[in-house]
Amino acid sequence: MKVLSIICARAGSKGLKNKCIAKINNKMVVEYSIEYSLSLGDDVKTVVSTDIEVLIEYCKKNNINYIRRNSDFCTEDSPIDEAIAEVIEKQGTDCPLCSLVYGNIPTRYCDIFFEALSFMEVNKDFDAAISMQNVEKYHPVWMFDFNDEVLPKDKEVHYRRQMLPQKMIHDGHTLLFKSKEFFNKYKGLVPYDTEYIYSIFGDRIKPIINSKVIIDIDTKKELELAEAVITNYKERVN
């Protein structure tokens, strides 16, 4: 089944300036996402959606398919849905499935994508598959409302991690969904309940649980962590 792989990378990040084109081992962060997408095989069509001039020049030089993202879809408040719909409309009408690939996640694993794809090919009654991880020690019952003057008082619940109820969170790695269904909802042709998270991607979404080291870069600390993970992996392989 043909898949449209959309790599989203825009300029103007507030957390870490130019995070998608920051360097890890002489590669832009977004290069890792591009190389990952291109490695998924001939049935995966890679398109970069960006307003970053350096990245556009990189795509031109390396013959990588790209779309100069509409400037209206590049503001801090712009939902990712707009960029996705733009690429589907211009280059993905022949692809039944769409994969969202964030340009600021350089730690990539093909097996997670193929697990999601295999599930979607077999289970036609599902609308999407999304990679999730157990939140482990970053559990909401151990979290406080931010206050840098005094630690807020909060009730004790459980002090052992294994006693906490399991919670999961999208790790940003894989989101595979039906292109036409998403596009029709985005255009208002099909109603959906906007009250629920990820509802534009479908009503039945399969969580793909994994424990891979996946780093979503929004801060300098996360950039340093990603560099350490990627460098360590490279050294072990070599």
Image (cartoon, rainbow, N blue to C red):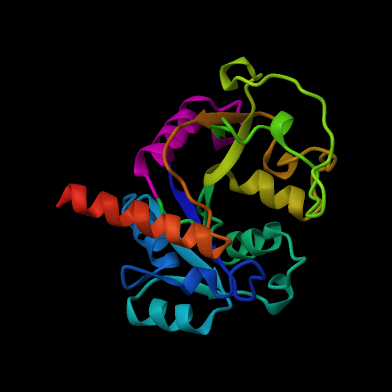
Q: Can see residue 127?
A: no
Q: In the displayed image of the protein, which residue is found farthest to the top?
A: 163
151 drawn magenta: no
The answer to whether 152 is drawn above or below residue 4 in the figure is: above
The answer to whether 52 is drawn above or below residue 129 in the figure is: below
Q: Can see residue 79?
A: yes
Across and down, in percent, residue 194 comes to 83, 43
For the magenta stretch, what is the residue range? 108-132
Across and down, in percent, residue 228 comes to 36, 55
Q: Quadrant of residue 58?
A: bottom left
Residue sitting at 67 percent across and 42 percent down?
Answer: 201
- Residue 198 vs residue 177, the one in the foreground: 198
- Residue 81 vs residue 166, the one in the foreground: 166
Residue sitting at 59 percent across and 69 percent down?
Answer: 16
- In which quadrant of the rendered image does the N terminus lie? top left
Q: In the displayed image of the protein, which residue is found farthest to the left?
A: 238
Across and down, in percent, residue 70 comes to 67, 76
From the viewer's perspective, tell me whether residue 81 is left or right of residue 16.
right
From the viewer's perspective, tell me whether residue 39 is left or right of residue 183.
left
- Residue 143 vs residue 80, the one in the foreground: 143
Across and down, in percent, residue 217 comes to 53, 59
The answer to whether 204 is drawn above or below residue 113 in the figure is: above
- Residue 174 vs residue 41, the one in the foreground: 174
121 drawn magenta: yes
Residue sitting at 46 percent across and 78 percent down?
Answer: 55
Residue sitting at 46 percent across and 49 percent down?
Answer: 3
